[in-house]
Image (spheres, rainbow, N blue to C red):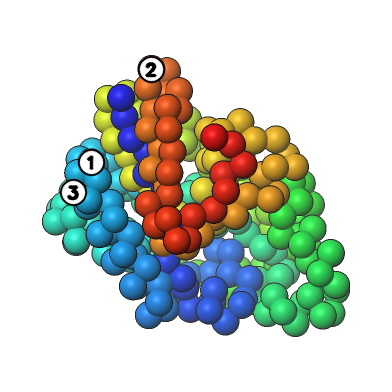
Amino acid sequence: MSFLILVRHGQSVWNLEQKFTGWVDVDLSERGRLEAEKAASLIKKQNIKIDFYYSSFQLRANNTLKIIKKILKDEKKFIKAWQLNERHYGALTGLNKIEMNKKLGEKEVYEFRRSWDVKPEPLDKKSIYHPRNIEIYKEIPIDLIPDTESLKDTYERVLNYFKKEIEKKLINKNVLISAHGNSIRALCKYLFKLDNDLISKLEIPTGNPLVIKTGDEIKIESCEYLDKDRAKNLLVF
């Protein structure tokens, strides 16, 4: 028996401002820090010993995890993987979601956000928001840095890393991943065997730990969001 705990970072500053964030490195809002603290308290009550911690390269996920580890009083180092980053929103990056709904229409913006294989236009490589121009991505080979991504692209990079580096640890070990809405959505598609239509409808709440209990061959035995007031339907179970 093992536990996999998935935590979407607490609300970020750009979540608050309704901006498409993607790979831009923004920090938590005050509400986001409080969500991370509550997540940590809920996890602590489970009395689950975490053997491995993972996060993306991004500040909002890293700081959520740091808050969790501090409250758990766990000094183990965590592993950062750019493959666990949020989806890259291409030319939508930095734009306001409400304004774009008015400009393009809700249906088209929703398609960019949630459809399986539709990508926004690429982000100009000269943009200050392009990962090539953000310091934390300097160590990533430039040919691996995207200009835009679909959910399918995100799924493929997240799953490649998960299968190679994390899945094998879920054999009598417990893992906590602090990541993002779309990288966690990708993991849920794989773990719960969601089809391309269902994955587009899956909502991932900020700062609410999803605890997945697994048995032999990493078969899911149970799952639950710890903050019941903000739980989302997993469309399974």
**Mark positioned earlier in the residue sequence (2 or 3):** 3
**Mark positioned earlier in the residue sequence (1 or 2):** 1
**Residue at disc 3, secondary structure:** loop
> Is 201 rendered above or below residue 197?
below
Q: Which amino acid does label 1 sit on?
A: Ile
According to the image, label 3 marks what residue?
A: 76
Residue 169 appearing in the image: no
Residue occupying image coordinates x 29% and y 66% = 37
According to the image, label 1 marks what residue?
A: 48
Using the rendered view, name the quadrant where residue 101 is placed.
Answer: bottom right
- Image quarter hosting the C terminus: top right
Cα distance, mark 1 to mark 2?
A: 18 Å
Q: Residues within 10 Å of mark 1 (few under 14, many from 20)?
A: few
**Residue 20 as seen in the image, left or right of residue 158:** right
According to the image, label 2 marks what residue?
A: 216
**Residue 82 as seen in the image, left or right of residue 122:** left
Q: Position of residue 200 (x, y in %)?
A: 70, 49
**Residue 38 as seen in the image, left or right of residue 116:** left
Residue occupying image coordinates x 18% and y 55% = 72
> Is 25 rendered above or below residue 232?
below
Cα distance, mark 2 to mark 3?
A: 26 Å
Q: Where is residue 38 in the image (x, y as percent from the top left)?
A: 31, 64
Q: Are marks 1 and 2 in contact (CB under 8 Å)?
A: no
Residue occupying image coordinates x 32% and y 39% = 175
Q: Where is residue 28 in the image (x, y as percent from the top left)?
A: 41, 74
Using the rendered view, name the quadrant where residue 149 is placed.
Answer: bottom right
